[in-house]
Image (cartoon, rainbow, N blue to C red):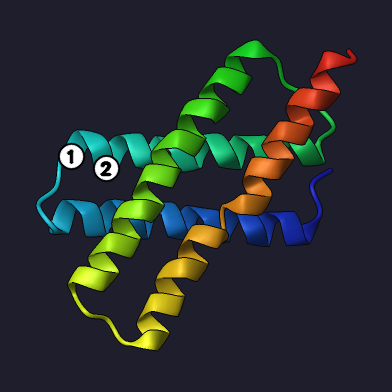
C-alpha cells in the first residue's frame, strides 16, 4: 500500500511535469521535447510507485530512468540559463532551482527500485 505522503509527492511531481509542459508549449518550444519531458516525469512517478510497492524494476525501467534523468537535467540547465537571460530576481531564481530539485528524491527512489529488482 502506498502511504499518503507518497501520493502527495506524486501529485507534486505531476504538477511539476504539467507546468513544465505548459510553459514549454506556451514559450513556442518544440512540442515533441515538451512531451518527452512530460514522459520523463511520468517515468520518475512510476519509479516512486515501484519503490513504495517494493515491486523492483528491471532493465527496461533502468533505461527509461536513465533517459528521463538526461532529459530533466537538460531541462534544469536550460531553465537556469533562461532565468539568467530573463534577469529574474532572487526569489524567482530560487523557485527555478527548487523546481529542479523536486525530482531528485524520485530519481533516487527509481534507482532503489532497480537495485531491489536485481535481487529478485
Q: Position of residue 112 (x, y in %)?
A: 78, 34
In the image, taking residue 8 as reference, residue 80 lies left or right, namely: left
Disc 1 crowd rating (10 Å Cα; few below 14, some 14-19, many 20+) is: some
Figure label count = 2
Quarter of the figure with residue 90 = bottom left
The residue to which callout 2 is attached is 34
The residue lying toward the viewer, choosing from 85 and 24, is 85
Residue drawn 25% across the image and 37% down it: 33
Residue 5 seen in the current view: yes
In the image, taking residue 40 as reference, residue 37 lies left or right, namely: left
**Which image quarter is the N terminus in?**
top right
Residue 84 position (above or below residue 54): below
Residue drawn 44% across the image and 45% down it: 73
Residue drawn 18% across the image and 74% down it: 86
The residue lying toward the viewer, choosing from 88 and 107, is 88
Q: Position of residue 64 (x, y in %)?
A: 52, 23
Q: Position of residue 12 (x, y in %)?
A: 55, 61
Numbered badge on residue 64: none
Is the residue under label 2 in contact with that under label 1 (CB below 8 Å)?
yes
Disc 1 from disc 2: Cα separation = 5 Å
Residue drawn 24% across the image and 59% down it: 23
> Please, what secondary structure does the residue beneath circle 2 have?
helix
Residue 38 seen in the current view: no
Residue 14 position (above or below residue 42): below
Disc 2 crowd rating (10 Å Cα; few below 14, some 14-19, many 20+) is: many
Residue 87 position (above or below residue 31): below
The residue to which callout 1 is attached is 31
Quarter of the figure with residue 4 = bottom right
Q: Position of residue 95 (x, y in %)?
A: 44, 75
Amino acid at each position: 500500500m502506498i502511504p499518503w505522503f507518497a501520493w502527495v509527492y506524486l501529485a507534486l511531481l505531476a504538477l511539476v511535469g504539467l507546468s513544465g509542459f505548459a510553459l514549454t508549449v506556451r514559450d513556442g518550444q518544440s512540442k515533441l521535447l515538451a512531451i518527452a519531458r512530460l514522459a520523463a516525469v511520468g517515468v520518475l512517478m512510476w519509479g516512486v510507485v515501484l519503490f513504495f510497492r517494493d515491486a523492483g524494476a528491471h532493465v527496461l525501467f533502468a533505461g527509461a530512468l536513465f533517459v528521463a534523468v538526461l532529459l530533466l537535467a537538460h531541462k534544469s540547465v536550460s531553465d537556469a540559463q533562461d532565468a539568467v537571460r530573463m534577469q529574474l530576481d532572487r526569489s524567482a531564481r530560487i523557485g527555478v532551482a527548487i523546481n529542479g530539485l523536486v525530482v531528485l528524491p524520485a530519481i533516487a527512489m527509481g534507482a532503489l527500485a532497480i537495485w531491489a529488482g536485481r535481487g529478485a
